Amino acid sequence: MELLTFEQVEKATERLLETGAKVGADSWQQRVKNQTPHCKFGEQGLCCKFCAMGPCRITPKAPKGICGCDAAGIVARNYLNFTASGSATHSDHGREICHTLYQTKEGGNYQVKDPEKLIRIAHEWGVETEGKDIYDLAHEMAELALLEYGKPFGVQRWLKRAPEHTQEIWKKVDIEPRAIDREVSCSLHMTHMGCSSKAEALLKQSLRAGLADGWGGSMCGTEFSDVMFGTPKPVDTTANLGVMEKDMVNIIVHGHDPSLSEMIVFYAQDPELIALAKAEGAKGINVCGVCCTANEVAMRHGIPMAGNFLQQENVVLTGAAEAVVVDVQCIFPALGPLSKCFHTKFITTSPIAQMPDSEFIRFNPENAGENAYNIVKMAVENFKNRKPELVHIPDLKTKATVGYSVEAIKKCLDRVTNSHVDETYTFKPLVECIRSGVLRGAVAIVGCNNPKVRTDEGHIRLMKKFLENDIIVAVTGCAAQAAAKYGLMDKEAKKFCGAGLRRVCTLVDIPPILHMGSCVDISRMMILAAEVSKDSGWNISEIPLLGCAPEWMSQKAVSIGNYVVATGIDTYLGVDPYTAGSKECEEIMQGENGLFKQWVEAKYTVEHDIDKLADVMIEAIEAKRTAIGI
Ligand code: MSK
C-alpha cells in the first residue's frame, strides 16, 4: 500500500472549488485570504473587551488597560475565558448524553446496549445494583451524573480513577474540580471586570476548569455514550471523500452528539426508506460522517468517514450530498449558504447550534425516532433534485480500522499475552513493551484542522515520524480522520513503522495509529494514562507519553490541553494559544521550571515548525525513558 500525498488531496480540493466557483459558492480558502493578516493584538491575546470602557489594547506606549490591568492579566483572562467556553461545551455535550440516558427504556428510542459497563460504573460510584432493573439503574445513574454538574459540595466522582499521586497533586494544588458548572461559572466570574487580574490565579483556574471537562463532563459524555450505544470495538471502515456514493442518497452527519447520528444511522437502514430511495432512482442510502460525529458512528457501526473539519465544505461541493444533518460544535455557518448553491438540505437540530439558511428540526430524546425518520425521508426525496452536471466525487478512499476504546485495547493486548485474570484485563503487556524498548513510548495526537497549518500536514508528518521511531500513536477528533484519510489506520500501515512497533502491530493485530474516538473521548486517553500508571508503578508524568495538538483551533481544544497538562502529560501545540503577548504567562505555562511544571509536573510547548516539533517530542520521550532508568 501507498499513503495518499498532500498533493493528491489538494488537487481533489481544487477540482471541487472549481465547481464551487461555477455556482458562486464561497469557500474557507477565500475567507482566509480576506481575513489575513490577522489582528496582532488578538493573536497575542492583548486585546481586552471584558468591559465597555475599552476595548483596550496593550502596546509599549500603553502597557496597561484603562482599569490598570497589565498584559499578563489580560492574556490570562482571555485564556481562562477561552478555556471556560471549551469546558462548558464539552460538558454540556456530556450533560445531553446524561439526559438521554435518563430517557432510555426497553424498546424505546434509546436503550442500554452495554449493561455491564453501566453496572461497573455504578459499583465505582457506590450504587447498589443487586436486583435492580437495568433501566431503573440507568435512570438513577443519569440523575447522579447530572448532579455532578451542580452539586453544592465535594469534587468530581471520576477523579478517583486517577492514580493516588495525581489525586494528591490536584488536592495539594487546589485544582480538584468541584461541580462542573461551578468551575465554568467561577472562571467567568474571575474574568469579569474588577475580579482577577493576577495571571497565576487565572491560569491555575484554567487547569481546574479543564479538569472539570476531562475528568467531569467529557468523561460523562464518553462513558454514558458507551452505555447507550455500545463500547467501541475494532471495526473496519473507509475514509475520505470517495466514501460518498454517486448512485446513492448521501446523508452527511456532522457535529458531536451521537444521540442524533445513532438515530439517523438506524433509520437509514429502514427497509421502507430504502425502498423509497430505490423508487426515487437511487441504489440505496449512504450515511457518511464529518468531524467527531464521523468518529462516533465509525467506531460503533463502521460508517464511513467523509472527512474532518476543513473538509466539511467539500462534502457539499461534491454536489452529491442530499442532506447535511448537524447537531452541535465545529459546524461552519458557511454550510447554509453553500448548501443553497446546490440541492443539499442543511438541517440543524439543536437549539444550541442554530444557523441561517438551515432547516431547523428540533431533536430530543422523545421525538428522536420520528424526527430521524423524517430527516432521512427528506434526504431521500431530495435525490431527484441533484444536478448531475455538478456531481463530482473525488476518487479518494482509504481503508481504516477504528474503535480502540480502553477496553478494546486491553483485550487486543491480551490476545498475545493471555494475561487476564477473572475478566480483568490490564496494560501490563504495553508497559513491558515500553520498558523493554520495543516501543519507545506513546503520543496522543488530537485536535482539529486550522488554516494556519497546511491541512492535515501537521498530523500526518508527526505521525509518520513517530511510527518510524517506534512510538505508538493514539488519536481522537479530526486528527483521527486525518490518519484514516491518508491510510495510516490501515493495518498494512505497519510497514511504515520501525521494527519494534511493526512487530507489536503484527502480534496484536492492530494498526499503528489507534483510533480512540471523538473529542470528548480524550477522557478515554486519561483513563488509559491512569491505568498504565497503575500497571507500571510510574507516575503519569514519568510515563514516556506526550500529548500533541498540531492543528488545533477551538476553545474545546484549549480546555482539553489544560486537563491533559493537569493530568501530568506534557503537551505540544503547533498553533499559538493567544498567549504570546505575555512573557509571564508563557513562563507559567511553558517554562521548564514554570508554575505549571511545579504544580502538575507537566507543561505546554508551542512550536510551529512541524519537523522541529517532532524532534523535540522524540527527545522528550527519550528523556523520560532515561529519567525512569529504562
Ligand atoms: S470535531 S474540536 S474540529 S477535533 Fe471534535 Fe474536529 Fe476540533 Fe471540532
Image (tube, grey):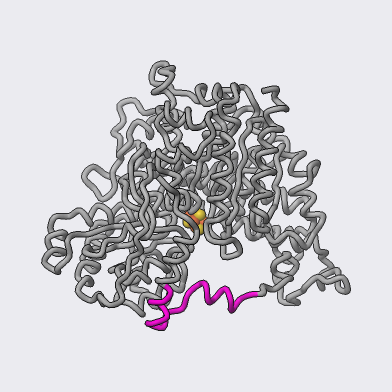
x 40%, y 54%: residue: 293
Residue 46 percent location from the top left of the image? 75, 67
Looking at the rendering, the stretch of residues picked out in magenta corresponds to 17-36
Image height check: is 471 above or below 37?
Answer: above
Which residue is pictured at 27% across the width and 77% down the height? 389
Residue drawn at the location 58% of the way across and 47% of the way down: 462
Q: Is residue 144 visible?
A: no
Is residue 14 among the parts visible in the rendering?
yes
33 to 505, vertically: above or below: below
Q: Which corner quadrant holds the N terminus? A: top left
In percent of width and height, residue 427 lies at: 50, 25
Given residues 336 and 208, the one toward you in this image is 336
Q: Nearer the viewer, residue 54 or 247?
A: 247
Using the image, determine if residue 521 lies above or below residue 114. Answer: below
In the current view of this chain or complex, which residue is farthest to the right? 61
| Residue 27 included in the magenta stretch of the image | yes
Q: Quadrant of residue 342?
A: bottom left
Q: Quadrant of the C terminus?
A: top right
What is the residue that sits farthest to the front in this orientation? 2
Q: Residue at x 25, y 65 (%)?
A: 246
Q: Position of residue 88 (x, y in %)?
A: 55, 55
Q: What is the magenta segment's predominant secondary structure? A: helix
Q: x, y percentage for residue 429?
A: 50, 22
Seen in the image, is 547 located left or right of residue 478? Answer: right
Tell me if 340 is positioned left or right of 108 in this view.
right
**Callout count:** 0
Please tell me which residue lies in front, 204 or 463.
463
277 is within the stretch colored magenta: no
